[in-house]
C-alpha cells in the first residue's frame, strides 16, 4: 500500500486534433495539498476530470485512494468530492434541497441527509440562505454551496478546480481557510489554480503544467528558488523620474545583468532575494529624492513563473480549456 | 465493476425534476391547455363534418385518440429540458457520485409521470364537461389511462435520446415534431382509416399510436380491447429496448 492518495503517470488525452494532455504525471501524498498550477488551456481541468472519473484518459490510468479510475470508477466516486470551475449547483433548488439531494444519492437516510446539509450550510455561512433558490445566490455563495455539495459524503480526496477564480480577495481568503480545514481533517486536496500565491499559500507540493505537459514539480520553496523568490515593484510619483527609478532598482536586483522589467503603466519590477532588501530600497530612493506612490513586494505572477521556466510568455495562442465537451 | 441501479436514487432525482417543473409552471402548458384547445378545435371544427353533423359522437371517437396525440406531443419537452439541463454543471456532480449512470435519465422520465397524469386528468375532465361519458366501468378507465401513461413513459425515451444527440435544445423540437406529426396524424386518432389509400392504411395499422388509441377506445367505450392492449404493451417494450440503451449511450458519450 502506497501513501499516495492520487497517483497518475503519463496521462494523455486528445479532443480531436487538440492534445489536452501529453503525458502528465501527478502525485499527492495522503493528507497533503497538491497544487496544479498552469494558465488557461494548460490541461488542468482535463486532468481533474480524468481523476474524478468524468473523462477517460486516452492512455494510461490513475489511482485515486488506491482505486483505478478506469476499472473501479464507482470506488473512486465513493471517496472523492469535486468542485468544478463553474459552480455545479442546481439553480432551481434551494441550498438545503441541493445538499439533501446529494446526501440521498450517497445513500444517507433522509434524516441524516438533512442533518448533514444543515451542518454544511452552517459551516459555509449559508444558514440564512438555506431556503432560498440557488439562482438568487451571489457568486461567492454559489461557490460555497458547490464546495459544500462536494463535501456531503466526507470524501477523503477533494478536487478543487480553480476554486477562487472570480472571487474577490476576502472571499479568496475564506476559501483558503476551508482548504486548510479540510487538510487538517485528514483529507487530501488537489487544487488547480492560475495563481502562484494561492499555490504557495496552500500547497505542500506544486506541479506546473503547460500545453498538457508537466514543466516543473517541486515544493513551493523549491519552486520559488527556481523562479527567483520575490519581486519588488515601484511606481514613481513623477513620471519624469522614471529613468532614475530604473537606475536605483537595477542596483538592488538579485540577478546581475538582468535589466528591471517595465510595464505600460510606468511601473518598474526587479527580482529580489528576500524582503530584507526593503529598508535598503527605501533608503536608496530617499537618497535619490524619488517619491513613489507604489512600492510592493510580491511573488512572481504565473506569467513570470512561466517566463523563467520556459523562456516564453504564457497566455495567447492557447487552445481553450475543454470544460464540458 | 458497475454500480447497480437503485430505484431510490431515481426517485430522488425524479423529485428534483418535479421541483424544477413546479418552479416554472409554464412548463405545464402543453399538458393542460393543449389538450383543451385541441379537443375544442377538433370537436367543433371538424366534428360536424366528419361525423355527419353529430359533434357528440365525434367527441366520443376523438377523445381517446386525443390522449395518444397529446402524449406524443408532450414528450417533446423532456428531450428539450434534458438537453438544457445537461449543459449545466449539476450533471457533472451526478457523474462524480457513486450512482448508476442511468439514474439521472430514469429520474427525469419518472418525473414526467406527473405531466402525463395531468394530461389524463385534464383530458377526461374537460371531455366530461363537453359531454364525453365512458361506456364501461371505472376499472377499465383506470386501465386505459394506465396504459396511456405506460406508453408515454416508453415513448419519452425517444425524446431523451434525441435530446442527448442533437446540438441545441431548439433542434430537439424540430426533430421530434418531424417524428410526432406523421405518427399522430397517420393514425386512427382523428378519422377511421377506411378512406385512406392502401399504403397509408398499412402505415396506420402498424403505427404504435394507432394500437394505443384502439386499446384506449376499447377500454373506455366497450368492445374487444385485449389484442390492442397486448400490441401496445409490446410496442412499449420495444421502444424501451431500443431507445433506453441508445439514450444512455448518447448520454455517457456526451460526458
Image (tube, rainbow, N blue to C red):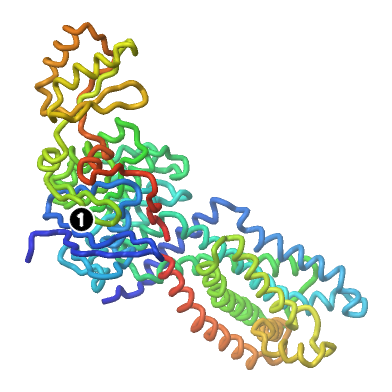
Answer with left or right where residue B164 lies relative to residue A317. right
The answer to whether residue B64 is visible is no
Subunit that carries the residue with mark 1: A
A154 and A189: which one is in front? A189
Q: Which residue is mark 1?
A: A157
Quarter occupied by residue B205: bottom right
A245 and A192: which one is in front? A245
- Could you tell me which secondary element the residue under label 1 belongs to? strand
Q: Position of residue A240 (x, y in %)?
A: 33, 11
The residue under the point 29% across, 11% down is A241
Q: Position of residue A301 (x, y in %)?
A: 26, 36
Q: Is residue B60 above or below residue B170?
A: below
Q: Position of residue B45 (x, y in %)?
A: 87, 68
A179 and A231: which one is in front? A231
Q: Is residue A215 above or below residue B215?
A: above
Q: Quadrant of the C terminus of chain A?
A: bottom left
The residue under the point 56% across, 65% down is B78
Quarter occupied by residue B107: bottom left
Answer with left or right where residue A95 lies relative to residue B20. left
Q: Quadrant of the N terminus of chain A?
A: bottom left
Q: Is residue B197 above or below residue B15?
A: below
A268 and A122: which one is in front? A268
Amino acid at each position: 500500500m502506497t501513501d499516495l492518495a492520487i497517483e497518475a503517470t503519463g496521462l494523455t488525452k486528445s479532443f480531436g486534433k487538440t492534445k489536452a494532455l501529453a503525458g502528465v504525471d501527478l502525485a499527492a501524498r495522503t493528507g497533503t495539498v497538491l497544487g496544479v498550477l498552469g494558465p488557461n488551456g494548460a490541461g488542468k481541468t482535463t486532468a481533474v476530470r480524468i481523476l474524478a472519473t468524468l473523462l477517460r484518459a486516452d492512455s494510461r490510468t490513475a489511482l485515486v485512494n488506491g482505486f483505478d479510475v478506469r476499472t473501479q470508477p464507482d470506488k473512486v466516486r465513493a471517496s472523492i468530492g469535486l468542485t468544478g470551475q463553474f459552480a455545479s449547483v442546481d439553480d432551481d433548488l434551494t441550498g438545503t434541497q441541493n445538499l439533501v439531494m446529494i446526501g440521498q444519492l450517497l445513500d444517507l437516510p433522509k434524516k441524516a441527509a438533512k442533518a448533514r446539509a444543515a451542518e454544511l450550510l452552517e459551516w459555509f455561512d449559508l444558514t440564512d440562505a438555506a431556503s432560498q433558490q440557488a439562482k438568487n445566490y451571489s457568486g461567492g455563495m454559489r461557490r460555497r454551496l458547490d464546495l459544500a455539495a462536494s463535501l456531503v459524503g466526507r470524501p477523503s480526496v477533494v478536487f478543487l478546480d480553480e476554486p477562487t477564480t472570480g472571487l474577490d480577495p476576502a472571499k479568496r481568503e475564506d476559501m483558503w481557510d476551508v482548504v486548510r480545514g479540510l487538510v487538517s481533517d485528514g483529507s487530501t486536496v488537489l487544487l488547480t489554480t492560475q495563481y502562484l500565491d494561492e499555490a504557495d499559500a496552500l500547497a505542500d507540493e506544486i506541479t506546473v503544467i503547460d500545453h498538457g505537459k508537466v514543466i516543473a514539480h517541486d515544493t513551493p520553496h523549491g519552486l520559488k528558488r527556481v523562479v527567483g523568490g520575490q519581486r519588488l515593484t515601484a511606481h514613481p510619483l513623477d513620471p519624469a523620474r522614471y529613468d532614475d527609478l530604473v537606475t536605483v532598482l537595477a542596483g538592488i536586483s538579485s540577478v546581475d545583468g538582468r535589466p528591471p522589467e517595465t510595464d505600460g503603466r510606468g511601473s518598474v519590477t526587479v527580482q529580489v532575494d528576500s524582503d530584507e532588501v526593503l529598508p535598503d530600497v527605501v533608503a536608496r530612493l530617499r537618497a535619490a529624492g524619488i517619491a513613489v506612490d507604489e512600492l510592493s513586494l510580491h511573488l512572481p505572477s504565473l506569467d513570470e513563473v512561466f517566463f523563467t521556466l520556459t523562456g516564453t510568455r504564457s497566455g495567447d495562442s492557447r487552445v481553450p480549456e475543454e470544460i464540458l465537451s | 465493476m458497475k454500480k447497480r441501479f437503485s430505484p431510490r436514487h431515481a426517485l430522488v432525482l425524479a423529485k428534483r425534476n418535479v421541483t424544477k417543473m413546479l418552479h416554472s409552471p409554464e412548463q405545464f402548458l402543453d399538458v393542460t391547455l393543449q389538450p383543451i384547445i385541441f379537443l375544442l378545435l377538433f370537436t367543433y371544427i371538424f366534428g360536424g363534418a366528419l361525423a355527419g353533423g353529430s359533434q357528440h359522437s365525434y367527441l366520443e371517437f376523438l377523445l381517446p385518440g386525443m390522449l395518444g396525440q397529446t402524449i406524443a406531443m408532450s414528450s417533446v419537452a423532456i428531450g428539450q429540458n434534458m438537453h438544457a439541463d445537461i449543459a449545466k454543471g449539476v450533471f457533472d456532480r451526478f457523474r462524480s457520485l457513486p450512482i448508476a449512470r442511468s439514474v439521472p435519465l430514469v429520474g427525469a422520465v419518472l418525473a414526467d409521470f406527473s405531466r402525463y397524469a395531468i394530461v389524463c386528468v385534464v383530458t377526461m375532465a374537460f371531455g366530461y364537461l363537453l359531454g364525453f361519458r365512458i361506456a364501461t366501468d371505472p376499472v377499465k378507465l383506470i386501465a386505459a389511462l394506465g396504459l396511456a401513461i405506460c406508453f408515454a413513459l416508453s415513448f419519452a425515451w425517444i425524446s431523451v435520446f434525441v435530446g442527448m444527440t442533437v446540438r441545441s435544445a431548439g433542434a430537439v423540437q424540430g426533430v421530434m415534431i418531424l417524428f410526432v406529426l406523421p405518427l399522430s396524424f397517420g393514425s386512427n386518432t382523428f378519422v377511421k382509416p377506411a378512406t385512406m389509400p392502401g399504403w397509408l392504411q398499412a402505415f396506420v395499422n402498424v403505427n404504435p399510436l394507432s394500437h394505443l388509441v384502439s386499446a384506449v377506445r376499447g377500454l373506455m367505450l366497450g368492445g374487444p380491447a385485449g389484442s390492442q392492449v397486448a400490441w401496445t404493451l409490446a410496442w412499449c417494450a420495444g421502444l424501451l429496448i431500443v431507445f433506453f440503451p441508445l439514450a444512455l449511450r448518447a448520454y455517457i458519450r456526451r460526458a
